[in-house]
Image (cartoon, rainbow, N blue to C red):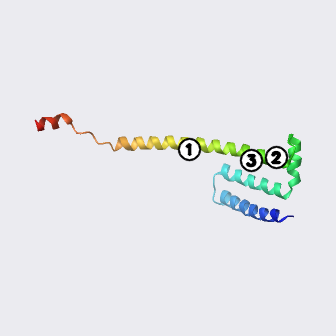
Amino acid sequence: MSIFQIVSLGILSLLIVTTFYRGVVTHGRAGVWLLWFMLFVATFIAILMPNMTADIARFVGIGRGTDLVLYSFVVASLIAFFLIFVRMRRVDREITKLVRDIAIRHAIEPADTSSTQNRQS
């Protein structure tokens, strides 16, 4: 086992335990913590058994395991960016609605300009 594998597996072990603890013990959002947990476990397995990624890559028609990992990362990143974009748009719309509501609630009626002009005359 290489130094990279030892260090990486140690870090991933901490991430797996922390993610599991935060998800199960503190009752976090099931979908989010489970996704991270599965990602960390899959990474742990891929680093522990690098030949397995090559076997899976050949099975799905990709030449090397490294390419499979890279393509998977690119697809996952695009999905994540899209989901973040959609959430940011929703937050932006909600902030706009809140600002409009606050502005309407705190609006001051304009002074009657005709009565002001009559007094000055």
Identify which amino acid the numbered label 2 is placed on.
Asp
Which residue corresponds to the image point at 68% horizontal and 58% vertical from the top-left?
Answer: 24
Which is nearer the N-term, disc 1 or disc 3? 3
Q: Which mark is residue 73?
A: 3
Q: Residues within 10 Å of mark 2 (few under 14, many from 20)?
A: some
Depth check, mark 1 against mark 2: the one in front is: 2
Element assignment for label 3: helix
Residue nearer the viewer, 22 or 114? 114
In the image, taking residue 90 as reference, residue 104 lies left or right, namely left
Which residue corresponds to the image point at 82% horizontal and 66% vertical from the top-left?
Answer: 3
Identify which amino acid the numbered label 1 is placed on.
Met
- Expressed as whole percent of the image width and height from the top left, the position of residue 76 reads 71, 45
Element assignment for label 2: helix
Residue named by callout 2: 67
Above or below, comparing residue 119 to residue 55 in the picture? above
In the image, taking residue 109 as reference, residue 72 lies left or right, namely right
In the image, taking residue 55 as reference, residue 18 lies left or right, namely left
Question: Image quadrant of residue 8?
Answer: bottom right
Identify which amino acid the numbered label 3 is placed on.
Phe
